[in-house]
Amino acid sequence: MVRIGLLIPGTVLRRGLEAVLRDFPGVVIVASWGWLPDGIPVDEIDVLIVSGHEIDGEALLESLPESDRLPAVLLLGDDPGAVRPWIGLAFRAIGALPAEAGEEDLAAAVTALSRGLSVWDPDLMTEMQMADPVPAAAVGLSGLAAAAIEALTDRELEVLQLLALGYANKKIALDLSISEHTVKFHISSIYGKMGAGNRTEAVRIGLQKGLITI
């Protein structure tokens, strides 16, 4: 079960999200606010969906009670400049989607973030990089990953995409009609080419480089 909190000042957007999320299997809305409340029950929320251009990330972080497990944050908005200040804040994971993102994209993002994976819309990431390149350290990239990534094969890109969705090796094998041994081979190759040490880092690098779509 993924527990969702909404922090969306815009009434129309907030009500629309509530209606959409209620139909998602395995998702429950714990709380919904129109503005920053006095207290947010962080231990009861897995993913906090926020209107990125209307909520100050640092102010939100400072308002939260101490916890060993802060929620992941999904920012909704079309302004890369509003998203940038959130990078590097100490949430469990951070992602960003356009305000008008479709239901499939929203579901994929919520699932990935609930598992601690960062999710970035490729267009927003590209615009941020063009305006002011994000330092590698800010998004957790190693020096090797921040430089050049050896081209992934079409199959490796498919595997990377499924890793971003949180699929286990067995599920990847079933979806691609290949053996689990072959999946492990592709994942090992992906790590080597991307300079990643684990799935989370490979996905983060893939998102930063625009190799993953949601």
Image (cartoon, grey):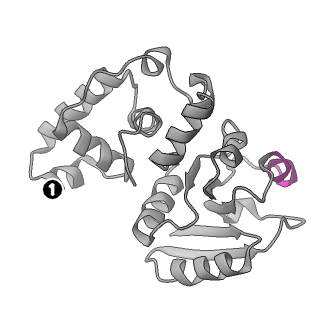
What is the x, y in percent for residue 157?
25, 40
Task: Please give the range of residues in magenta.
Answer: 58-66
Is 178 included in the stretch rendered in magenta?
A: no
Total marks placed: 1
Quadrant in the picture for residue 140: top right
Which residue is pictured at 77% across the width and 49% down the height? Answer: 57
Q: Residue furthest front?
A: 131
- Residue 60 magenta-drawn? yes
Circle 1 sits on which residue?
A: 174
Mark 1 is surrounded, within 10 Å at the Cα level, by few (under 14), some (14 to 19) or many (20 or more) other residues, namely: few
Give above or below for 183 relative to 171: above
Would you identify the image quadrant in which residue 51 lies?
A: bottom right
Q: Residue at x 37, y 50 (%)?
A: 213
Residue 43 point in image, percent of width and height = 71, 60
Q: Quadrant of residue 5?
A: bottom right
Q: Is residue 96 above or below residue 127?
A: below
Q: Measured from the top left, where is residue 26 in percent x and y?
A: 46, 74
At x 67%, y 40%, the residue is: 84
